[in-house]
Amino acid sequence: MHRQSLLGLMLLLGVSSAQAITISSFSPQGATSDLRDVKVTFASPAVHFGDSQLPAPVQVECDDTKAVGQGRWLDSRRWIYEFDERPGPGLSCTAVVSKSFRSINNEAISGPAQYRFNSGGAILETSRPYYNIIDEDQVFLFSFNAPVNTASLIKNGYCRVEGIGERIGLKAIEGAERDAMVRSEFYVDEIDDRYQAVQCARPLPADASVSVVLEPGIMTKIENRKGVPNTDRYTYDFNVRPEFTASLSCMRERAEAPCTPVGSFGVQFSAPVAYEHLRQIRLQAGKQVWEPMSDSDEAWQDRGPSQSVRFEGPFPENAKLTVKIPDNLTDDAGRSLKNPQVLANGMSTTTYPPLVKFAVEPFGIVERFGHADRDGSDDSDPPAIGLSLRNVEPNLQTEQMLVSAGQVGAMAVTDDKEVLAWYARLRQLNYSWMVSAEHLRNIMDKDFHITAPVDQHGQLDLRGQPLLIGKEVKKLDLPGMDQKDERPFELIGVPLKDPGFHVLEVASPRLGASLLESAGTMYVRSSVLVTNLGVHIKKGGDDLLVWVTTLDDAQVVPGAKIRVMNCRGDELVVGETDKDGMFHHPQAVGSSDYCNDTGLSGLFVTARIDKDNPMARGKDEFSFALSEWNSGIEPWRFNVPYSWGGSDEPVAHTVMDRSLFRAGEVAHMKHYVRERVRDGFKAPDRYPDTMIIEHDGSGKRIELPLKWQKTAGGSVFALSDWKIPKDAELGVYRLRTEGDNQYFNFGEFRVEEFKLPVLGGSIKLGDGQDRPYLVKPKEMQADLQLHYLSGGPADFLPVQLSAVVRKQSPSFSAYDDYSFAPPEKVEQSDASESRVFLNKQRFQLDAQGGLRAKLDSLPVVDQPSEFLVEATFADPNGEIQTLTQTVAVWPADVVAGLRAGSWLAAGSSTKLSAIALSPDGKPLKNVPVRIEAANVQRFSIRKRMVGGFYSYDNQEQREDLGTICEGRSDDQGLVQCDVQLEKGGQVELRAIARDGEGRESVSASSVWVSGSGYLWFGGQNDDRIDVIPAKKTWAPGEKAEFQVRMPFREATALVAVEREGVLQAQVVQLEGDSPNVSVEIKPEWGPNVYVSVLVLRGRLREVPWYSFFSWGWSQPLNWYKAYSEGGGEFVAPTTTVDLSKPSYRFGLASIEVSSQQDALDVKVTTDRSQYAIREQAKVEIQVLKSDGTPASGASVALAAVDQALLELSPNNSWNLLNAMRALRGYNVQTATAQSEIVGRRHYGRKAVAAGGGGGKSPTRELLDTLLLWKGNVELDAQGRATVTVPLNDSLTQYRIMAVADLAGDRFGSGSAQIVTTQDLQIISGLPAIAREGDDYQAQVTLRNSSPRAMTVKVTAQYRGTGLPSAALPEQTLELASGSAKVVSWPMTVPLSSGSADSHQMEWTVNAQEVQQSGASGKAAKDSLAIKQEVFTATPITVQQGTLVSVGIDQPLNMSVQAPAGALKNEKGVVQGGLQMLFRSSLGGGMEGVRAWFERYPYTCFEQQASRFMGLRSEQAWAGLMQRMPSYMDQNGLLRYFPSNYGWGSRVLTSYILDISYLAESIGLNFPIPDGFRNEMLQGLENVVNGRMPNMQTVSRQERDLEVIRATAVLAKYDRARVNMLDSVELNLQSWPTEILLAWVDLTQRLPGIKKAEQTRKEAMGLIQARLVSRGTRLVFGEDSLNGSPWAMTSRVTNQARLMFLANEMPDWEEDMPRLAQGLLAEQQRGAWRMTTENLLGSLAIELFSRHHEQNPSGQSMVILGSETAQVVDWDMLTPDGQGVRSTKIDVPWRGDQADNLSVEQMGEGKAWIEVRSLAAVPVTKPISAGLSMERQIEAVEQAKPGVWSRGDIMRVKIKVKAQGQASWVVVSDPVPAGATILGSGLGRDSAMATAGEEKSGQWPSFVERRFDGYRAYYERFEEGTTEVSYTVRLNTVGQFVLPASRAEALYEPDVFAVWPNEQVLEVVDAPAH
């Protein structure tokens, strides 16, 4: 102990060492491409620790005088100079050692007198072309990271051509020619010498291999810089394109066969041909001529050169097809075709190929009576399925397996599962022809007999494998084609005599011979359900409804047996349909989302009736449906809030006493959680036990236990209180819970610094008409009213009015599927642009505090807009405040809306709906509406440029389609029409509605029309219909009317009221001329329900006159109606479509139910309306239910809150009813078998049916804003309660709010208002804070609220701890009755004593009425205590920081000294000192990383491997290794996901091998099995040796990186050879950091590498230069070379790998703790961002901990000079969640002199200490320490230019530059005392003043608007520039001291920037007008 102190004392006395001080390390030296700083490290302490701004040891001088920076001392040995900007390439610098510098031992610096370095030459970043094939005159474009000298590029570059034994020089392409190519290829506007274009000096021969080589020596060309040559060599390999030739292609059955006539025919060229030439090419066969396929109907068309044309068949059989080309056809380079004879010779066609195809595959429903007349028999006209045949054998055989309807009974059990199994099999096997034999057996049966050939991969062609093999089947012989018949194909009908499920399979050897590789028999298969029953499913969240109808006439089927199964066939529910054909199961039916064995999801529902049922017509009937049969009618298509989980989330809500708090106050809360069910609410199965209060932005959270209580009245809630810490972050706090099924959001509140307003008021805007909007107004009336919250008008108060107009995007909640947006104007730059039309016009309120202002200079409104009007006035609280109001402004008294969808196939019909609404959203009838359209097509034209590049010209063609629909709106305000759009493109639509005065409203939308006629996402729009409610909201007991827009003349409809499930259902018959339905509204349906209509129409039939004799005689009225309507909508079937088949439509509408059955009527009354301070108010509460009866036992939360607080922030949490009554989602899925009907076809012939077979603070900063909170007031039997509210000293208005709930099902709220007042009132206008040295006007307002005049004397005095006391002069003033006057004193804020940053000044202001002699009564008086926080002008801040370790053999002795200029207190003691943070470990146990891995959900191979190793789970890792074969490709490389297809990843394979090795190196057991590891290593060897077919990289540079990465891994497993690196070009300057690290590792592991020592040293120098140095950490900079997602690398992974390397290097021993600190600093909330980062980071920290840490015990003793020691007792410290023990001690400065800081470890282990120097140093110049900043202010509003006045608004703009990435950076900027920072969004904010605030770069995580300044917090601050601006209103007259602005990293206090502000900011009183 004494030995160490003696050593320190010797150092302080200047005992010289034997040698002068030396520089042990200087970086950079030589060339460094990533130059950002200069780092100097001394071999021994050079300066005293404590001041980073001590003299520099070297002077940095560069050839470019603009390249400047700042230097600082990181600690006593390390000095760093950081450039203000990254200098970029070409900078040459010299660091000259200072001759005048002397160390703490008075030593000069010995060694080199200077160090030279440069930022390296230009690096080639990218090049063009990036493709391999080039032109003969190809131009090569190069993009460097700096301008280069063109002549040096030409000198050092050449072309090398295969077969030519000389180098071909380069020539430069310059000027406009170069610029055009650069713009085309690099998409840049500004072009300089960074971009170079060259050609080989002579044309290149066709088909030759060419390399373009750029040798080192290319010079930079930058103004004021000498020029630096590059050191990298670049080689690019290409092949010259072949000669211009043509080829033909077509579809063939086999490679050698002629063309098949049904396919397409293609002409391909080896080079692009102009579009004009291609359109002239024709295909001929005899006299027939075909034109090329066109994209003229497509929305986007290519009109540029192309290399192919295609002709669409069919073509004649056995014909010669030739191609005719234009005579002048050339390619885009002007070359003629070398082989035109290929086109002239053409190609031949063969006969049409054989075809066998069912009308539907793999499943369809065939109507049992689809071919029979009405009431006919399926025996005489059996059902059939269409089968298309062409060129197949005459005697085709078809096998049929029938799963019959069976008897209703035991037999049906097996059959149902069999039907499901076969349906699933055929669907699964329909996805692909090729399938593995193993997969086929899994689907069919493990014993399934496979007869088709199986290839070496275990795959077989399903088309050659019969599925019905070994099954009991019926044989059908089908007629083949007549071989002499010339018809291309024939459609026959395959009869299906019996109802049931049929599996059909056709065998055709001829088809197999033509199409199968094996030439064996081919099988075509399908399945059909023959039935007359339609099954319809509604699966709700809590029920299931099945509806059964007939297909032929859409009649309901009673008595059907229903069986419900899951997708595996397990029975769930059985039942029977009622008289309406419905079976309603009232409980939820659970089903799997997906069944792996069947590939299905949802439910499988069957229905049966036996043959005796009248609806069965003599035969057992069977049908089924799946709940996934809902294509086109899925809930999401109807624009309703669909609950995918099957039920709504529970409602969670917190009632709070207030929504706005100050730090230090208590937040009171009452929490509710209720589950929503169809009948209302129920208690959740489990209540959350912890409430999380989380700050929005910082993520800081606290957890409060929840204790749920239930009252006698049935209410369940939890009460909790939270005392907000005084140092809590400002901003939004969110309330939530988490856990299994416990993720609920309860609400939010804010913590802010604010002053309460004294005045309340309102603005009303209008045009004299009683409506809440304006229509194209010429004048507007603004009514303003202001009053004191404690009672009385703000008489004769001056105000200013301002107004802007701004665009708005109109929307109406009841019509959220309509667009009301106006068309965009071409000149419209910003849709939200605001224009000021009234600017600070001055007015004065009248005696009643009112104003009516007539505004007549209004802007013309031609589209939906709003006027925003602001009234600005001086509140007696000392602030200038703003009231705001907006009003909607419309161009017409009608609003047009348009609904058009998004996508449409060309030629199909779409329904357009226009709507006319009033501006307040009510439908308008009889309004003229029209829809106009325009088609927009876009063309892309590619043009060839010189040198093989292309430019693209995009053009737009617009065609006006005119008015496509018009009419007058109906009762619902609708105009609808069907429109067919034939042409592809974007169709722009406009709906135009005209009001009674001829003013028009226009809304716009667009629909994209696909010219292909096909939309990949399926689901037809015509399956959906509109269901239109007569109004949006209905009351219980009303009959809700709906219009059903169906396309049928008559139909059967299922009308269902739905929400959680089906609440009610009814069957109705609809007529086309009056398709209306009605539903009586029930009270329990509140707040909303959904009404769906499923409309069914049976088969349409032709009704000839003679049909009377077949069925008409028995149904004469029905027959006559059908006959007289001429067959109705019947359309005869064709070979491809049946429009008369049974059809359906589905529609859905949402309505709201204004039910009050869950509402409570809450009445709050008080015994008086006005009180004196400190009295008690008696409050009566009465609560009634909706029927008027008392709400006995209800629970009431009561809050009495200052109205002034509510003026700033209304408390929306009090509206419990609305919160619990949130609109509910839609939870029903509808599916119908009707969607699967095949329909009839017109057959050529029918086959013959087979026989047989079968089978506080006070008011306005004085008293608390909350008087009382009672969370649970229980009401008596009469629904009443009485509460006494104690009043405090505030003179204000209070709102007493009662929020009630009854049994958790009924809710309500009510309030009363009371006022506290007195005759004489003092209102404080003092600023909340002040700074030492501020001179300002301290003012208060005196108000006389009595009916008499007063003479008043007023006095004021102040005092405070650390502050002197003083009394201000007495003043006397006269106050008329009801008047108020301002009293002010000039105030200079005194200096404080002590070292605290702030002190509290306590003011007392007294006012006393001076009574005249003879006056009666008591004189009025008031006394007010005000607290004001006084800040020091120069705060104590961190000046320097360093990280050290101490152990029993490694004590700390550090020379320290307070910074020069540090301020002293009144006793002459230097303020500040040394702050020391002791820690047992830097990293701890990585618990945050473990928790991150445990939550990580994704499962690619890398993610699993990283996760399992990160969790140290050897078992899970071993399991993954066993699954490795499914991830491995044939080359031994790993894929990210298991697959049999695609290449493996070289990067992934290297990563897995690498992490396994790294784990083993630190003693972890995560091996890769030998066999798999060898395959992987062999794969990487193949990568290195170029034997991978997918390694076709263009540049050698990319391949070099691949080789180094793979070889570095191979070297770790002793599989690398030196010759693997022979082809690698050593371009170290441009290598990514991960490759530099790999190279360093390679040169240490692999002997014999050329220049190994030299390149290793250069690489380590570059790595060191890329590190950003901080006092306590080292991190890699934010640079593209420091990470790549494609290489699975980042700054974090690179830092982790560097730690593994550096751990073995003695030179890096001192830096390892800083590397570890830097790595840990990259974490966010305890973990890094990615799996690779978390794994490698945790491995690196574990490595560091094992080698560099030892858990300390005993004590650490700290001594500064001769002071008494302070002790850290490690054994008394408790570990935190990461297992780290820590503590902090502060050691004050002993004076200006240097001292020795000594720390000894008196025990085992090693401790880490972060030492920080703290002092109050006045700032006179900007300081940059890892950050730099600039600040400027500008006027937003300034009454007198160049002078700041009270009420002016200024904009502060701050720019911060970061030299490297940092976490949790705060930008802190001071504002003058009394000023308000705008933009908080609180009630007296100004939206107009804050318009124009800008942010760029990083966005703050959260912002604090404090009384003393603005603070923006950034969780992550990336390298580069970040700008932020904010707005300040000046409220106080005076001269104000502003401390320096500061940006700093909270957890790296030595990283900061300081900007000195002007000494004093003067604010004068506002000029009089």
Image (cartoon, rainbow, N blue to C red):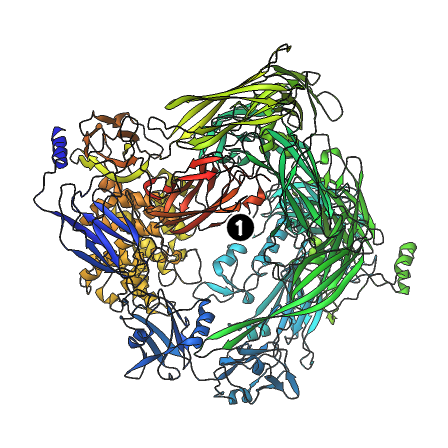
Residue 1601 pos. (x, y %): 31, 63
Tell whether 842 sits left or right of 1925: right
Tell whether 1617 sits left or right of 1555: left
Residue 1550 pos. (x, y %): 33, 57
* Depth check, front residue: 1442 or 1582: 1442
* Depth check, front residue: 126 or 1024: 126
At 22% across and 33% down in the image, what residue appears? 1792
Q: Quadrant of the N terminus?
A: top left
Residue 1112 in sight in this render: no
Label 1: which residue?
596
* Depth check, front residue: 1926 or 170: 1926
Asked if residue 1004 is positioned above or below residue 1224 in the image, the reply reads below
Asked if residue 1968 is positioned above or below residue 277 in the image, the reply reads above
Asked if residue 1855 is positioned above or below residue 1745 in the image, the reply reads below
Q: Secondary structure at mark 1?
A: loop
* Depth check, front residue: 909 or 213: 213
Residue 1291 pos. (x, y %): 59, 22
